[in-house]
Image (tube, rainbow, N blue to C red):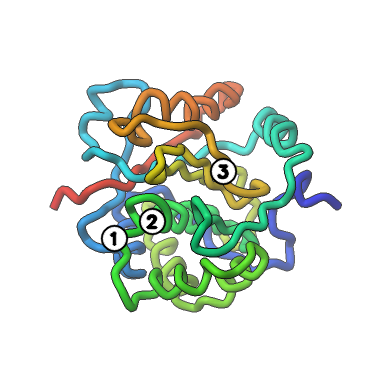
Amino acid sequence: MSSSIHPDPGADAPAFIPLEANPELMTSLLHKLGLSSALQVHDVYSITEPELLAFIPRPTLALLLVFPVSATYESARLAEDAGVPEYAGKGEDEPVIWWKQTIRNACGLMGLLHAVSNGPARGFIEKDTPLSTLLTQSIPLPPPERSALLEKTPALATAHHEAARQGQTAAPDAHDDVDLHYVCFVKTDDGTLWELDGRRKGPIARGKLEADEDVLSQKALLWGPLKFLERGGGDMRFSCVALAGSLD
């Protein structure tokens, strides 16, 4: 059966406890894995009110959106992915590094990995840490082998489990079916806005931003999260967090 029609990992796949969109927990998880304390995850209280966006340090390096996987969204995904080949990129010349999600309920972790491994944020990964090792090992591998590497990296599983257990709400079981999903938006050095989602066939270039535009610029929001809100169908279970400079 086509992986495009049913992109989620199967019932027999490895499974993680879903990660809450909690900036403190996400920041702690990333720092534990090797991200510099110069960056942290911030709550985004609104993507339509400039006065609330003003609380987030700029430039913002990545935006993670949590959204409901609705029938409307799935129809749009299938239409856009139709005829698109499965991504096979690898090596130092890739514009972005992307991982296919093969671990159930690991979309929060996938979003965080995509956020810190691409664009300027990659420069904040400290040497000789789980993140730097994962990145070094992943870059030369094609996507299927990258996914297998994630499944076999104990440091990721341990850190994720600890973070997921500390959420403010009761954690679901790792094998529960969850209809909320994370997608990550990053801007690379050439100005491209990328949508990175392990449920898709590969990374998606959404357009070119100007030098003074980041992932919270009006253009990036229109090309990215606001498109998801348009397909929400009245379901308001959306939330955002952003990766940017630390306030401490």
Instruction: Please state which amino acid type lies under the numbered disc 1.
Output: Phe
Coordinates of residue 163 in the picture (x, y in percent): 39, 63
Coordinates of residue 204 in the picture (x, y in percent): 58, 41
Q: Going by the picture, which residue comes out furthest to the right? A: 1
Can see residue 171? no
Q: Going by the picture, which residue comes out furthest to the front? A: 93
Question: Of the residues under marks 1 and 2, which one precedes in the sequence?
Answer: 2
Q: Residues within 10 Å of mark 2 (few under 14, many from 20)?
A: many
Q: Nearer the viewer, mark 1 or mark 3?
A: 1
Q: Are marks 1 and 2 in contact (CB under 8 Å)?
A: yes
> Can you tell which quarter of the image residue 74 is in?
top right
Say which mark, if any, is on residue 216. none
Say which mark, if any, is on residue 116. 2
Question: Of the residues under marks 3 and 2, which one precedes in the sequence?
Answer: 2
> Can you tell which quarter of the image residue 11 is in?
bottom right
Tag count in the figure? 3
Q: Residues within 10 Å of mark 1 (few under 14, many from 20)?
A: some
The CA distance from mark 1 to mark 3 is: 29 Å
What is the secondary structure assignment of the residue under circle 2? helix
Depth check: 40 or 196 in front? Answer: 196
Q: Nearer the viewer, mark 3 or mark 2?
A: 2
What is the secondary structure assignment of the residue under circle 1? helix
The CA distance from mark 3 to mark 2 is: 21 Å
Up-down relation of residue 167 to residue 79 (above or below): below
Which residue lies under the disc numbered 1? 124
Left or right of residue 157, residue 73 in this image:
right
Please report the residue visible at 48 percent of the width from the left and 34 percent of the height from the top: 238
Up-down relation of residue 164 to residue 149 (above or below): above
Q: Are marks 1 and 3 in contact (CB under 8 Å)?
A: no
Up-down relation of residue 235 to residue 99 (above or below): above
Instruction: Please state which amino acid type lies under the numbered disc 2.
Output: Val
Which residue lies under the disc numbered 3? 180
